[in-house]
Amino acid sequence: MATVKTRNQIRFILNGEDVVLGAVAPDATLLDYLRLQRSLRGTKEGCAEGDCGACTVLVGRLASGKLVYESVNACIRFMGSLDGCHVVTIEHLKGEGGRLHPVQQAMVDFHGSQCGFCTPGFVMSLYGLWMKSPEPSDAEIEKSLQGNLCRCTGYEAIMRAARAISDYGKVARDPLLAEREAITSRLRALKDGTRVEIGEGKSRLVIPADVDDLATILEQEPTATVVAGSTDVGLWVTKQMRDIAPAVFIANLDGLHSISVENGVISIGAGVTYTEAFETLAKHIPALGPLVDRIGGEQVRNMGTIGGNIANGSPIGDTPPPLIALGAALTLRKGASRRTIPLQDFFVAYGKQDRAPGEFVEAVHVPVPATGEKFAVYKVTKRRDEDITATLGAFWLTLAEDGTVAKVRIAYGGMAATPKRASAVEAALLGKPWTEATVEAAMARYAEDFTPLTDMRATAEYRALAAKNLLLRFYMETTGASAPLRVSRHEAA
């Protein structure tokens, strides 16, 4: 492999200014940089874990050569992930003739702010939405604000403001749109194909030049922390005070952002975010659309990656159970060598995956259910949006011509130390008629598969009962239940 050029600075654009930093700690967050080093204090610290949205900013990046702006949580966004990006804070917003920006003016006129602490975050989330959808539906507004919490207004005033933004100005005249061509050119100039190395030893921060360079780096630094979206690693730093150095940041690697559909299989690069994957997954596997919409808030989905959710190995990760049920496979890479394994075999024990030192997740391959195959996934949480799973069940089923169960895969999260198949339950269903009696008999086998724990999200007893009832729900939905089992409030209205 040719020698990779290196530099010892990260380079990005902050509002309208070019920034070059040569001293950046691996665990330095964008929020701390904005507030402590730049005195841009409109970006607030509320939760420091990506939940409340008070720290929301926009980050523009080049995706397939096109400039895309996304809302992100500055509190868990590391500086090492910003190389080649455009960071936009509340201070950069402006309207024509020195007036307030349309989003800000709408919030003022419709009384969308009371104490004001959360307001900059709401404004930035609505700004990101407005640029994509100038006349958003209520469902789009609510989706964009899933990751923003307010204790004062009750949200309805913010909803009214969001509906009215385009009455105060047009997207076509917004500065970020007017500057888009110039910012795109500046960002292209920053993508010089070099490796970034800052610091030494345990304090190293590394940004690979490309995926091949990533493989080389991890062979040399097999214990390094690989940081993709940082929606979990960020909390290791802000909540657990863990040392993540040396850290290797991979969000910039175009080679990990590919997503394709070929011969009935969706192949997703490890760096593909939930937002990037949504359209393809929702189109080809409709049941995954509503699940992705409930993973964190919009800011988390814009940062978090499917590959990271898998590689992390969390027993409550939302994507592994449905992907296991679908029969997904995982490509792992070490140096120039690759191997592909069933995803279900990747999870060995709590905190342990089938991944050798220096090996990393490169892609996941998800079969699209064929005609006649039944698939569903259900997530149980304390609140519907932006909440961590208590238990999640995923079901894939093929029936024989005589109505008996020919093939079945059932996988759960939140029920064991790893995402895990319900093998005993599957065995109880195979070859049996797909009837309520069969399902109820199989439900007795759950105790052989799972011994759930009691924690802050649910008791063991609740999890055990909910897991059984999700199988019953799947049966009802696949046999033509007379009433819908889930109705959104927008549909009800």
Image (cartoon, rainbow, N blue to C red):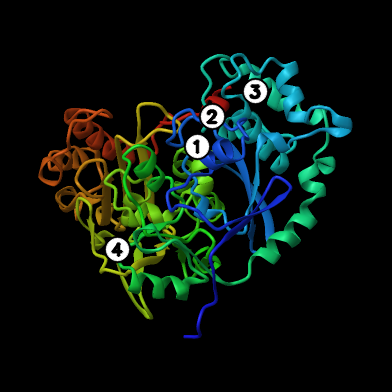
Indicate which label's residue lies in the foreground, 2 or 3.
2
Residue corresponding to mark 4: 223
Q: Is residue 142 above or below residue 210?
A: above
The dot on residue 159 is 3
Q: Is residue 488 left or right of residue 200?
A: right
* Furthest residue in direction right, as rendered: 97
Indicate which label's residue lies in the foreground, 4 or 2.
4
Indicate which label's residue lies in the foreground, 1 or 4.
4
- Looking at marks 1 and 4 on the same chain, the residue that comes earlier in the sequence is marked by 4
Disc 3 marks which amino acid?
Answer: Met
Q: CA distance from mark 4 to mark 3?
A: 46 Å
Q: CA distance from mark 2 to mark 3?
A: 12 Å
Residue 459: x and y in percent read 20, 28
Residue corresponding to mark 2: 148
Disc 2 marks which amino acid?
Answer: Asn
- Tags 3 and 1 in contact by the CB under 8 Å rule? no
* Secondary element type, mark 1: loop
Residue 119, picture quadrant: top right
- Looking at marks 4 and 2 on the same chain, the residue that comes earlier in the sequence is marked by 2
- Looking at marks 4 and 3 on the same chain, the residue that comes earlier in the sequence is marked by 3
Disc 4 marks which amino acid?
Answer: Thr
Q: Residues within 10 Å of mark 3 (few under 14, many from 20)?
A: some
The dot on residue 297 is 1
Q: Is residue 341 above or below residue 311?
A: below
Residue at the spot 80% in from the left edge and 50% down from the top edge: 179
